[in-house]
Image: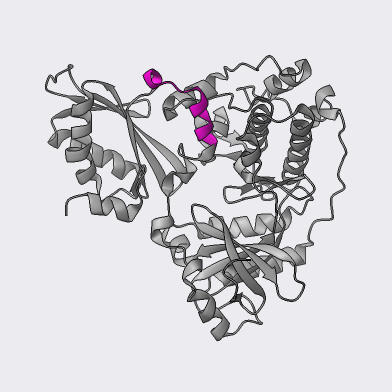
Amino acid sequence: MENKGCILMKRYEVGRMLGQGTFAKVYLARNLHSSQNVAIKVIDKDKVIRSGLIDQIKREISVMRLVRHPNIVQLYEVLASRSKIYFVMEYVRGGELFDKVSKGRLKEDVARKYFQQCIDAVDFCHSRGVYHRDIKPENLLVDDNGDLKISDFGLSATKQDGLTTILHTTCGTPAYVAPEIINKKGYDGSKSDIWSSGVVLYVLLAGFLPFSDSNLMELYRKIIRGHFRCPQWFHPEAKKLVSRILDPNPNTRITIAKIKKNVWFKKGYEKIETPPSPQGIQRSMLLKDVDAAFDPSSPSSSPSSSSSSVNSIDSQEELNVSATNYNAFDIISQSKGLDLSGLFETEKNKRLNTRFTSMKPASKIISKLQEIALSESFYFNKEEGKMKLQGWKQGRKGQLMIDAEIFEVTPSFYVVEFNKTSGDTIEYKDFCDRGLKPSLKDIVWAWEGCEKQEVNQLLPS
């Protein structure tokens, strides 16, 4: 391993970085007692607290301990220091399924095997009242044996006893999200997972996405309509299955039970025996450990770790998750999942748009946009969830018209998108640079393509 010598809580020798996400970095490590390779996800405590995502992290931990399945990445233990939380997880050497499909479509038998294992794992999650909500090739790993394992339960939701399965939070990666989530009318977590799994199946067999567009709004419209075509090389039964899964009506969408009875799906299918789930007492203790990880009075959730070991790990520069690594657009259209749409984009179809993220309430964002419209000589109108800004003056190509829309990613995290619908492009860019960005600096977390610190440097003081 690279960077040897960094010891975490006297248990793990930490090596090279395997990957980096929105909130964390993942490192390869070795258990000093068993010599087993593991993956350690390092999360910055302060960032989680500032972002209001403590409950989300706690849920991810408890969910991963609930869903013990051969096709799900296993969480071994959770450790914590004064400033970091560490997920010690199963190391899956083969990497992301995305890396395989990005090189082209897979052979039918290989694609079917991965889909069978994905459906088995998703079915198991649903049987435990867990809904992943972000099924995509980037979150599907492949081990040394060529078996698939679902990872990243950061956007998952659970069904507690007596509660309905209807959810309301808009989340997931745009190209894989179910139409009922976009419609924001409440949705069944199990049915949305089935949709996302169907998109994955299409991508494995085709090598590209069923729904793609460089513009986020257009992409959503295509998904809601559910219009797509299967390539001619799809097996007839595979076409039928994909069509049944990618049914925009969740009430008539095929269930997992019926997927498993499909002729194409059953070929070569081997049912996997799953281990028993943790007992209630174990789950209760795990929850206490999770709470302890955020207890400021407790330096570490590991009873065997000393203050010196905690300080040694915090002092390692390579394990710090700095603010500049927080790219808010990892979870929207700049994700690798949507990048596949570039295979079919043409310049003439691209529309001019600008996006930013904010942690302010939607009402404050709307109020701020009204204020900007007034000061910049724009009419402001709000209808059907969209805002329209229209310039009072005639420009070089008529009046400048801009659509704005707010998307809720989590209850405390929003994405705002602007689209120029008419007018001159130079005038639109000038409006964004001189009027929009400086006026919004108090509510913006990050502009698309910029980190928060970089944006602040670009704007006038």
Residue 93 placement (x, y as % from top left): 70, 53
Q: Which residues are magenta?
A: 337-349
Residue at the image position 12 percent from the left and 19 percent from the top: 394
Asked if residue 183 can be seen in this view, the reply is no
Residue 113 placement (x, y as % from top left): 79, 35
Q: Left or right: where does residue 212 sit relative to residue 242? A: left
Image quadrant assignment for residue 388? top left
Is 27 or 240 nearer to us in this picture? 27
Residue 88 placement (x, y as % from top left): 66, 64
Does the magenta segment cover residue 413?
A: no
Q: Left or right: where does residue 371 sit relative to residue 122? A: left
Residue 439 placement (x, y as % from top left): 20, 44
Residue at the image position 86 percent from the left and 28 percent from the top: 267
Residue at far front of view = 2
Image quadrant assignment for residue 209? top right
Asked if residue 459 can be seen in this view, the reply is yes
